[in-house]
Image: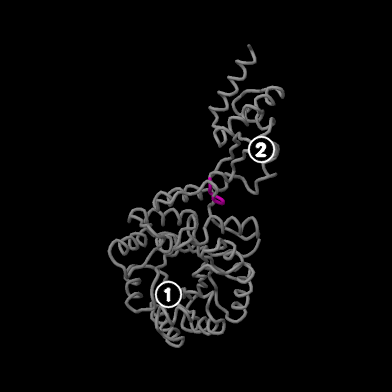
Amino acid sequence: MKRKIIFVDSTLRDGEETAGVVFALREKVQIAKMLDEIGIDQIEVGIPIMGGDELEAIKQIVESNHRASIMAWNRPKIEDIDAAIKSGVDAVAISIPTSNIHIANKLGSTQSQVIHDMVAAVGYANSYGLYISVSAEDASRTDFDFLVRFAKAAKEAGANRLRYCDTVGLLDPITTYERIKALREAVDIDIEMHTHNNFGMATANAVAGITAGATHVNVTVNGLGERAGNAALEEVAMALKYVLDYKVSLNTTRFRELSDYVAQASNRQVPVWKAIVGSNMFTHSGRYSDGISRSPHAYEIFDPKEVGLERQIIIGKHSSAAALKQKFREYGTEISDEDAQNLLTRVRETCISLKRSLFDKELIFLYEEYLEQKSK
């Protein structure tokens, strides 16, 4: 087993920055509770300087005395840090752009000023004993030499880690690995991966960064987040555990429950084909059904119960006669090879007509209809 990776969940901050998503106060409190119960190490709960319900939710989460560290997001401004301190959180993320395009166009500033502002904020937070993550916004488009200077300055000022942000999601796994490896060699500071999914590589890039030496990973439930979203908690966790053999100390059996709750709260339905928690993840309808009935591991890397799902065998156009026999065994009925083959023809015709697989009642009806015609 490889080293334990620290999971930092940002569903309540970056996840809520998804276009059109707003969590109610009670939903934020409940999501934090569920994240804590599954074993998330640190929960980024919001932005205290916003005040109002945002601040009230943060305070309620803090007062819940969760096992997880509670982190607030901040600009490199003293008033932001003060608001975070008053909210009661034990950790702060201090975020500032580091790429030339952001420094010039977003801040109208300079590299020297960026480091100055960051160091001042980190020093102030450090004086209050807070855990500090410094976010290098748009790090993937930042000049590498400047990023090294920025990271060294953050560490010297008292930062505990650097959040490497692929803000526009333009990285690929190979480039991610090379850059994180080089950064780790240049600066002795923990690195947190924060990846976006603009090109569908957020999970892959997060995992690549960890392989290169990153110690923390920033995730959201269902991959919520700005634009195309962030690396999904459930995907990163299971990829680390089963693809790369890392230690993952999370109660993954509640992933589907957590996914469903966040989906409802965010009004963003989880696609049936969603990796890890989608309802089709362990649903077999084609020619693989025979193999599954004999040995589930033939087509399943892990047991569906490990993420809170169940295996389903459904009958469709590409199902076999053997799959039909197995399905009817689930109903407590044994059918002959001849009946299965004859029924299969009807099944395929019906599936093509309906343009989908069959529900159990439809399959049973076809079988009863076949038996009736056979008896005549």
C-alpha distance separating marks 2 and 1: 51 Å
SS for dot 1: strand
Quarter location, residue 353: top right
Q: Which mark is residue 289?
A: 2
Residue found at the far top of this picture: 376
SS for dot 2: helix
| Numbered range of the magenta stretch | 274-278
Q: Position of residue 125 (x, y in %)?
A: 39, 78
Q: Is residue 300 above or below residue 181?
A: above
Q: Position of residue 25 (x, y in %)?
A: 32, 56
Residue at image coords 50%, 82%: 150
Q: Which mark is residue 94?
A: 1
Residue found at the far bottom of this picture: 112
Viewer-proximal residue among 95 and 202: 202
Coloration mode:
one colour
Amino acid at the residue labelled 1: Ile
Residue at image coords 51%, 50%: 255
